Amino acid sequence: MFDKLKINKKYLNIGLITLMIGVLLLFVYQVSRHSVDIFLFFKNLFFNFLAVISPIIYAFIISYILYRPLLFIEHYFKKLWDRWTKVSLSSKTYRLISLLILVIVVFGTITLLIKSIVPPLFQNLLTIGEDIPNFQTILTEWLSKLAPYFKLIHITENQIHQLTTYITGFLSGFLTKIFASGTGMVTNVATFFINLFATLILTFYFLKDKESIFIAIDKIATVTLSINTKLKIKRFLKDVHEIFGGFILGQLLDALIVGIASTILLLIIGHPFALLIGFIAGITNVIPYIGPIIGAVLAFILGLFTSVKLGLLGALLLIIYQQIDGNFVQPKILGESVGLAPVWIFMAILIGGNYLGAFGMILAVPIVALLKLYIERRLVKLQGKN
């Protein structure tokens, strides 16, 4: 009787293993059959989660950018307060007053920019929309004058016409997207203002209680992680701060300088779209190599609305300034925060742009710089062992 039970148990185990393999194969089959649906489900789940926590992400980025200006204000406010009043305040009071000063400065600057820059920008965009038919005529006439030279390189009049149609179509589509995005923001105004309010509140508290927040995170890490893991994470975050922080903050400062300088140069020569081009040149300047070209191309294309001479002069001025910025101004601001050869920067931009567009172009350079840092550290360790 017991022998039969052993045999039955053996067959039972075989049956259970066979059943498990069958269930696993069926699961794999169903997953492969519905892989697209599963991918879309997790993709939507991920992006919905990002949308929910977006105020936290935005608040973290804004507070990270504003933290250094806050420390600057706090340092000089404390110095002046102690000198004038001889009354010492608590560190929390110094931080709170400095934060209020920073809020006033930031909102005052934003208000000034909105009142002085936004109306002329929209006027520039409206002017472009109204003048696109005239622009196509001017461009066609100018290219027709160059037709004999184009024939030498086998470019036909039909191809010239296709080029002008493409450029004007691109400008029309660009304007349509800008106005459509503005309309979309208005239609989702409730969500926009809820997220904006949450972001502002979180930014305020991140700046006000930065040190205490970091102490709390450190305590959680001490409880949940080993000492070695905690030290590795802290070192990694320090590296990210030094490379990404130095690069991104430097790029933002350089973008501001480029935007102002480009606008002034174009205003000097009487370019009708100086403010719009300077604004776009400043924003796109955060993309290494690619961004500066966009400003010069825009100066040329939009300058054609007035004359070919103005377009060429505007593009030439921006190219000359960009050479000065790239060789003298930007290296002074960024310092050695990246330390990559131009060929590595270009390849990083190319790969990042293909996968994540403009956002990938911006982040690709500091990511490669971070990889370079860890490769060099690993190399030093290996050489030390040998």
Image (cartoon, grey):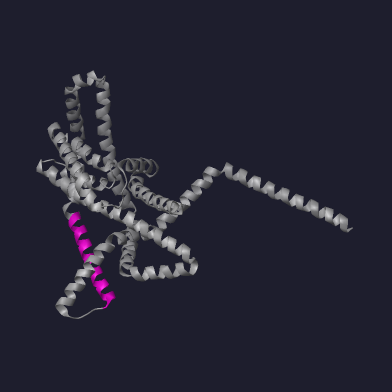
Direction from residue 309 to residue 47 in the image, left or right: right
Direction from residue 328 to residue 242 in the image, left or right: right
Residue placed furthest toward the bottom: 87
Residue 336 percent location from the top left of the image = 28, 52
Direction from residue 8 to residue 190 in the image, left or right: left
Instruction: Write the start and end of the magenta stretch as one range.
Output: 90-113
Residue 354 percent location from the top left of the image = 38, 40
Q: How many marks?
A: 0
Residue at the (15%, 39%) spot, across then down: 317
Q: Main structural element of the magenta stretch: helix, strand or loop?
A: helix
Residue at the (18%, 51%) spot, across then down: 117
Q: Dividing the picture into quarters, in which one does residue 384 lie?
A: bottom left
Q: Quadrant of the N terminus?
A: bottom right
Residue at the (46%, 69%) spot, across then down: 222
Vertical comparison of 10 with 290: above or below: below
Can the viewer see residue 255 in this picture? no
Vertical comparison of 118 with 166: above or below: below
Vertical comparison of 177 with 162: above or below: below
Residue placed furthest toward the front: 386
Please tell me which residue lies in front, 379 or 59: 379
Residue 56 percent location from the top left of the image = 37, 61
